[in-house]
Image (cartoon, grey):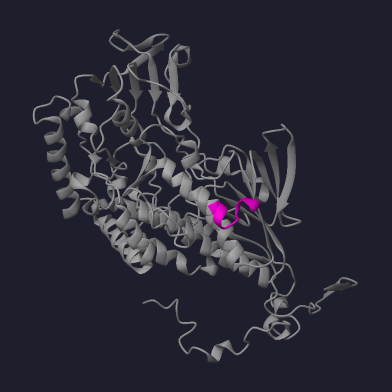
């Protein structure tokens, strides 16, 4: 366009329909989200320059950081992998943290994805500039201490929400003179053999570390604050006896390697088994009542029918209100002669142990805090969007956004596993792939239709949040219990997806572009139509411009109902 006096004259740009303008994308984090994004952008997008900043020394995210003994995934291994990088040689039904980390590292190397990553670089600020349509970032180089600057058209947050571990707020904690550890910051070489060990917390990490360590310690004291449903892991009907883990034989691994379709069928069976659990999350459903009765009987049987601990550890809230905790062998371990369970509150930590509220002192050589993470979703650094809106202030009262992948007031900003994502619905890796497809469609539209920015409308976000809140009145997640599904609060807003896993997939498969505010680079929204030709017609090595004659069904794929 050009100006003639005060009049703006529209001129057709010298581009062809389908021209993808060059865009720079920055992703925060090289965990599973960043790895998948790097692969998919490289495979399916063009004219996209990707840079990933990772605060750690390598890829893997939570699986790099969590190294405590017994750390494992409660999702079957064959469903905790990328669809584009199937692994027929998982050694166990439920993979350990080291094996998952190795899978992520091997996949990254196999597809040469590390070239996109700057390791030990921590993003400390991101600010949107309306005039340029760019995000301006400050990044700390952990090796040099120098702060560098970078900018991008699209900012994608792949840092997750379970990566900011925290110490418990107990007076005197850091006065302890023995080994003080957190499960999310485990020190290699830690030795607890024949020591008096205490574990604070009975969530997933607390259960796993206790089961792993109690056979070798002198005494194991576990400090339990709350009750929890101790269950088998996902897809237990495919696991070993009583839902236990098992090793795959060499014959099974060879069969999967030689017959990919058989492995895919196995994965599909596992996925169906996990997704069939959704009815469990509905209040007063037959499956919910059955699960509560079954697990109560199971837990009592493993503890001993008249064990006094049964009244303390078996919850009165519904199964699934907080994430059920897989714990094969845990309840049995609590009954061992070298294990003591303390439900009394801790008053303070002393240099040589723990003082209880009653005044009793429990002497310890090692103290393990299995107290989890900051579940608030609030980033640890300022992310400042349109009009100076800082997401930390926006989310102070409650985290909220659009379909778990975008935030109003933050143009050209996407995130993985945001508020109201399917956090309790099975493996997160398929979810990451679906969200990446969504992001790619949005980026492609920005590239090829000459848009400067896109942001979900305030009305769309408000409507989505209202629907989530209303829906969760009927779910077990909305009942009273303290859960990270509700930001670590007892009566917090439910932050899981309002529906089944398949429901989430179908919700995201076709973007609702009408829910977004699009800002054009031109005064004429149809400037992208350009010179009247398509890029297919002008390519030297022409792809088939008559593709529409090839398959009469092409284009109807999205009409799934």
- Indicate whether 86 appears above or below 12: above
Residue 202: in sight, yes or no?
no
Q: Is residue 538 left or right of residue 282?
A: right
> Which of the pair 432/242 is nearer the observer?
242
The location of residue 126, given as percent across then percent down, is: 66, 45
> Which of the pair 175/445 is nearer the observer?
175
The location of residue 520, given as percent across then percent down, is: 70, 68
Residue 266 highlighted magenta (yes or no): no
Q: Is residue 145 left or right of residue 34?
A: right
The location of residue 449, given as percent across then percent down, is: 67, 72
- Indicate whether 309 appears above or below 315: above
The location of residue 154, given as percent across then percent down, is: 65, 56
Residue for point 64% across, 83% down: 543
- Indicate whether 153 appears above or below 148: below
Which quarter of the rendered picture does the C terminus lie within? bottom left
Residue 210: in sight, yes or no?
yes
Q: Is residue 162 left or right of residue 382?
A: left
- Indicate whether 391 appears above or below 1: above
Which quarter of the rendered picture does the N terminus lie within? bottom right
Which span of residues is magenta-colored? 108-116
**Identity of the residue furthest to the right in this view:** 5
Residue for point 72% across, 51% down: 151
> Which of the pair 479/289 is nearer the observer?
289
Type of secondary structure dominating the magenta stretch? helix
Q: Is residue 144 left or right of residue 180?
A: right
Q: How many marks?
A: 0
**Identity of the residue furthest to the bottom in this view:** 549
Residue 414 in which image quadrant: bottom right
């Amino acid at each position: 366009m050009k100006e003639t006096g005060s009049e703006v004259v529209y001129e057709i740009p010298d581009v062809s329909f389908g021209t993808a303008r060059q865009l720079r994308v920055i992703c925060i984090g090289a965990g599973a989200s960043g790895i998948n994004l790097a692969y998919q952008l490289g495979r399916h997008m063009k004219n996209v320059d990707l840079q990933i900043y990772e605060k750690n020394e390598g890829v893997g995210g939570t699986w790099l950081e969590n190294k405590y003994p017994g750390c494992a995934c409660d999702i079957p291994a064959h469903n905790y992998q990328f669809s584009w990088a199937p692994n027929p040689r998982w050694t166990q039904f439920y993979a350990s943290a080291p094996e998952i980390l190795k899978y992520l590292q091997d996949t990254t190397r196999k597809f040469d994805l590390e070239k996109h990553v700057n390791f030990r670089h921590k993003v400390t600020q991101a600010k949107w500039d309306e005039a340029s349509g760019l995000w301006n970032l400050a990044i700390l180089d952990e090796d040099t201490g120098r702060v560098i600057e970078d900018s991008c058209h699209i900012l994608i947050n792949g840092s997750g929400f379970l990566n900011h571990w925290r110490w418990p707020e107990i007076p005197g904690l850091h006065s302890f003179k023995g080994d003080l550890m957190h499960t999310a910051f485990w020190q290699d070489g830690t030795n607890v053999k024949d020591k008096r060990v205490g574990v604070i917390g009975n969530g997933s990490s607390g259960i796993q570390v206790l089961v792993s360590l109690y056979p070798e310690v002198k005494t194991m004291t576990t400090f339990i604050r709350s009750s929890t449903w101790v269950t088998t892991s996902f897809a237990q009907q495919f696991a070993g006896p009583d839902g236990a883990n098992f090793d795959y034989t060499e014959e099974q691994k060879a069969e999967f390697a030689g017959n990919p379709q058989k492995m895919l069928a196995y994965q599909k069976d596992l996925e169906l088994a996990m997704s069939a659990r959704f009815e469990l999350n509905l209040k007063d459903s037959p499956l919910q009542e059955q699960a509560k009765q079954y697990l109560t009987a199971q837990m009592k049987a493993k503890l001993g029918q008249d064990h006094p601990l049964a009244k303390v550890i078996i919850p009165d809230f519904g199964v699934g209100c907080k994430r059920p905790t897989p714990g094969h062998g845990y309840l049995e371990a609590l009954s061992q002669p070298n294990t003591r369970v303390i439900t009394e509150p801790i008053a303070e930590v002393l240099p040589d142990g723990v003082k209880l509220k009653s005044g009793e002192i429990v002497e310890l050589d090692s103290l393990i805090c299995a107290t989890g993470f900051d579940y608030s979703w609030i980033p640890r650094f300022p992310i400042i969007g349109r009009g100076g809106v800082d997401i930390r202030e926006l989310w102070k009262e409650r985290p909220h956004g659009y379909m778990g992948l975008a935030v109003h007031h933050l143009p050209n900003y996407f995130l993985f596993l945001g508020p109201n994502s399917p956090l309790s619905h099975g493996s997160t890796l398929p979810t990451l792939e679906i969200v990446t497809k969504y992001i790619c469609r949005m980026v492609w539209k920005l590239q090829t239709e000459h848009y400067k920015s896109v942001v979900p409308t305030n009305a769309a976000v408000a409507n989505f949040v209202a629907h989530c809140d209303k829906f969760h009145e009927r779910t077990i997640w909305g009942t009273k219990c303290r859960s990270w599904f509700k930001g670590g609060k007892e009566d917090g807003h439910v932050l899981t997806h309002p529906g089944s896993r398949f429901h989430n997939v179908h919700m995201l498969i076709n973007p609702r572009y009408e829910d977004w505010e699009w800002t054009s680079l031109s005064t004429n929204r149809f400037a992208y139509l350009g010179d009247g030709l398509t890029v297919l017609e002008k390519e030297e090595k022409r792809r088939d411009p008559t593709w529409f004659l090839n398959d009469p069904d092409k284009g109807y794929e999205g009409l799934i109902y």
